[in-house]
Amino acid sequence: MKIVIYGLGIIGGSFAKAIKKYTDCYVVGINRSRKPLEDALACGAIDEIGNTEALCDADMLILGTFPGAMIKFIKDNAQLIPKKCIVTDSAGIKTDLCRELTDVSKEYGFSFVGCHPMAGKEKNGFSASEADLFVGASCVIVPCAADKSAVETVDKLMRKLRFGQIMYSTPEEHDRIISFTSQLPHVIACSYVMSPTCPKHTGFSAGSYRDVSRVANINEKLWAELFLENREPLIKEINILTENLNSIKSAIQNGDREALEELLAKSRRIKESLGE
Amino acid sequence: MKIVIYGLGIIGGSFAKAIKKYTDCYVVGINRSRKPLEDALACGAIDEIGNTEALCDADMLILGTFPGAMIKFIKDNAQLIPKKCIVTDSAGIKTDLCRELTDVSKEYGFSFVGCHPMAGKEKNGFSASEADLFVGASCVIVPCAADKSAVETVDKLMRKLRFGQIMYSTPEEHDRIISFTSQLPHVIACSYVMSPTCPKHTGFSAGSYRDVSRVANINEKLWAELFLENREPLIKEINILTENLNSIKSAIQNGDREALEELLAKSRRIKESLGE
């Protein structure tokens, strides 16, 4: 199978490395800048540095850029993508992207299967990529309008790359849950470290500071795009969080120990019921 | 040196185990219930199960209970504590506790040195204690009115127990910073998991969900007491967090990409400037 990867950042680069490590597929890399391509070729993560011509006989195309750039790339090059080709992505939001790419795929006859590898780091770029970034992680597949065999091909590949579990979802459900599990923690981390107290924390902090602040080390261009494309569910989750913060604050302010203990116990029971 | 430990939960138990592992001190345990004492004796974490009579020739008394219970124990037994004895605690808040215990120490002639070992787990009780819980962690010492030699004795002991760094602070500064580094992350975690979306997260979550929700597995009685005793600084931090959440929310709501990127970039720069 010939796989073209467009965008060799941490995710595209990790796909390249994992595919070379765990499968026999032939991998062609396309990237806006030259350096990641040369690094990827040098370390064996890709077999070939390509350009859009490589699409013509590709069996699969994996998109590894920002969501907006994915849509532009597909629209610009749709006429080069053969009907046998399965296009998949790695974006953190799905609703708009899946609608746009499904429309183009139907027009030109290739397949589109949405895909969200739930893995990452606080670092970016090809130098942060790892063959085992996805080991044990969750992969959400959003089949959209693709036929069964295209979905199965993506599913099989992801299992070979050692994802821990494959989940199936719709674009809307995916975006609703992701606004809570992934976007909101980034909003929280950024809001948290902006406290004027933060720079004084050294020596006064332990695991809970480290954990809640970790993802404040953010790629602001990527996450601004993800937040803006998932506006409605994310704002809803920020509002729910703010309400819950206010409930706890009121109990503290009123010195209402019983209400406070009950709120904290409710949280503990939720975590316990999830087996966490 | 004869050390009495009052309260053999995760912190008191870890002190017992660490003292037996890293020093030659003789350790006596006092605890409200019997089981932790028997377990501690059986595994060599204490040399003897004691009662308040053990205080009479103690060189050091380490308090490992909830803050309110620490104050009660000292007030009830102050007449048994010899002048040579150094009393220290392990509470997560300091202002009220240090004032009360310093007053009693002055009246009866023993020393009181405040101490906050910045370590813990999502589990409680003696069964969760570890000899190496403090290895590499930060220890905040709050000298209050204690003389230099008493402070040095506590400092030396903490270094022997392998704390990574010893910080010195006042009760007020300690409580102000702790409201941000430790209490606020617990408030956030509890507020976060109360979203109705939380139970649906399985398969749609990765590190950022895990990290921000971790400490929601909370001991509600302990943390309600800690929050209520540090009301003013904690409410201030919750307000700052809410304002920052609202700034990010407004930028998303207004579709203001530039403002949003600038807010996220500000957070990233704060993390970077701290070398994290």
Image (spheres, coloured by chain):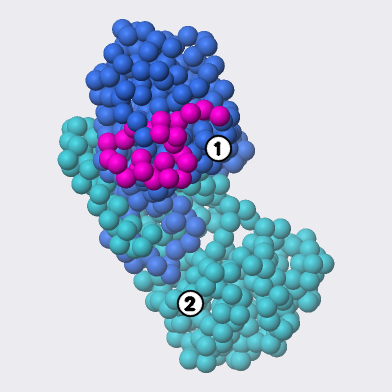
Chain colours: A cyan, B blue
Count of marks overlaid on the render: 2
In the image, residue B185 sits, relative to residue A239, either above or below, namely above
Residue A87: tell me if it is visible: no
The quarter in which the N terminus of chain A is drawn is bottom right
Q: Nearer the viewer, residue B157 or B197?
A: B157
Q: Amino acid at mark 2?
A: Ile
Name the front one of labels 2 and 1.
1
The span picked out in magenta is B24-48
Q: Residue at x 55, y 57 (%)?
A: A222
Give the residue pinned by disc 2: A166
Q: Chain of mark 2?
A: A
Q: Residue at x 58, y 52 (%)?
A: A122
Q: Secondary structure at mark 1?
A: helix
Picture coordinates of residue A151 (x, y %)?
A: 51, 86
Q: Is residue B33 magenta?
A: yes
Q: Amino acid at mark 1?
A: Lys
CB-based contact (under 8 Å), mark 2 and mark 1: no
Give the residue pinned by disc 1: B21
